[in-house]
Image (tube, rainbow, N blue to C red):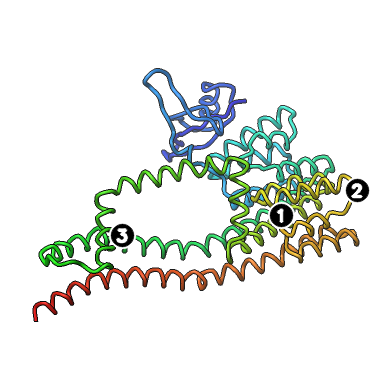
Amino acid sequence: MPAFEYKALAQNGKKTSGIINADSKKAARSQLKKQGLFPTEVKEQQSGKKTSGQGLNIEIDFAKYFERVSAQELAEVTSQMETLIRTSVDISETLKILAEQTENNMLRLALVEIQDKVQKGESLSSAMAEHPKIFNNLYVSLVEVGQETGKLDDILARLREYTTKMVDLQQKVIKAVSYPLLTMFISGAVVLGIFIGVIPRIRKLFDTFGATLPLPTQIVLFISDFLLNYWYLIVIAVIALIIGVPKWLATENGRRTFDTWLLKLPFFGNLFRMIATSRFSRTLATLLRGGLPLDKALPIAEKVLGNVVLAEVVSDATDNIIKGYAFAKPLEESGQFPPLLVRMIAVGERTGEMEHMLVEASDAYDQRVDTKLNSLASVIEPFMMVGLGGIVLLIGTSVLLPLLNMSALAR
């Protein structure tokens, strides 16, 4: 059944809007009138598809290109879904309630479409799988297991806990990098303003001087002239990077080279490795607790690593398990995963408490990531101060040396 987005006036004159299921636009208007609403606009909606028209009358909703469902919104919906299903509310009714109360248009439309498919007899997991931008393989696989075992509420509780932890980690990373990035942006803007607005005016004074300028002054003037006269080369270079780098990363060798380089970066390489390890451990633990066997859970958990080098190690470990060998051995031999994780996995294999050990490992690395992120500003700030100080020193020297020479000649 199609979903229609509507705008209407209530009997008290108040404006309202929402989503309604109906066989046609006419039927949607009829339903709205029965609810005491006067529809002013009704249009069919399909999530993930653009609105188009005929001939020159083409309407493009640019906002849809920027629509997304955040991890925080997914965590909230998962929590509400768990609560409703745990209180014995029907799945179809649960989806309807969630669609009515969510403010995210992309998520609301997806829930309406999922509800429609569930009403037609399709399983919840297969309906969710048609919206991969919202519900990833991890989510769909666990929902499928929950339906098969009749413990969907328990599965949703684990998904809620998992998404909440991922949101916390994401917010910590954003909070840690936002201050250094903002400082770098402001410092760069100030320096750029000096080279474009201040140096050209000082140059006029130097031109009247007529003498040979010191090397620092020549360097500063050259940079200023380049920014003023050849700025288009910088724009072209930036555009080339924006286009070229993604294409390079899309190649197998490019991605592997870049991911290898990331892991070898001083300070940041270890931070990237710990974040990937934490996400992988928690994801795998969630899948195992949901009832998936290890050999089926690993390919799903592998995708959250976000690094080809680490993912290849996990892929080799999966093959090792299928052949009947230990999981921890390939991780240890690769040298790519932290020793603590390898030891805890080995203990989990011996004791049969793999899920518990993975959660412990994830918690441990979350704490380490938190400590690293808190110290990030103290690590970056000295380098930023040295760099900015060097630029200020170069500019100051370039201005003062000619002035001192002018004073000496005047004497």
2 and 1 marks in contact (CB < 8 Å): no
- In this view, the residue farthest toward the top is 55
CA gap between label 2 and label 1 equals 22 Å
N-terminal-most mark, 2 or 1:
1
CA gap between label 2 and label 3 equals 61 Å
Q: Nearer the viewer, residue 404 or 281?
A: 404
Q: Which residue is mark 2?
A: 324
The three-letter code of the residue at mark 1 reads Phe
Q: Locate residue 219: give its quadrant.
A: bottom left
Q: Nearer the viewer, residue 160 or 385?
A: 385
Q: From the viewer's perspective, is the residue at label 3 or at label 1 nearer? A: 3
- Badge 1 marks a residue whose secondary structure is helix
Q: Which residue is mark 1?
A: 280
CA gap between label 3 and label 1 equals 42 Å
The three-letter code of the residue at mark 2 reads Gly
Residue placed at 61% from the left, 56% from the top? 167
The three-letter code of the residue at mark 3 reads Leu
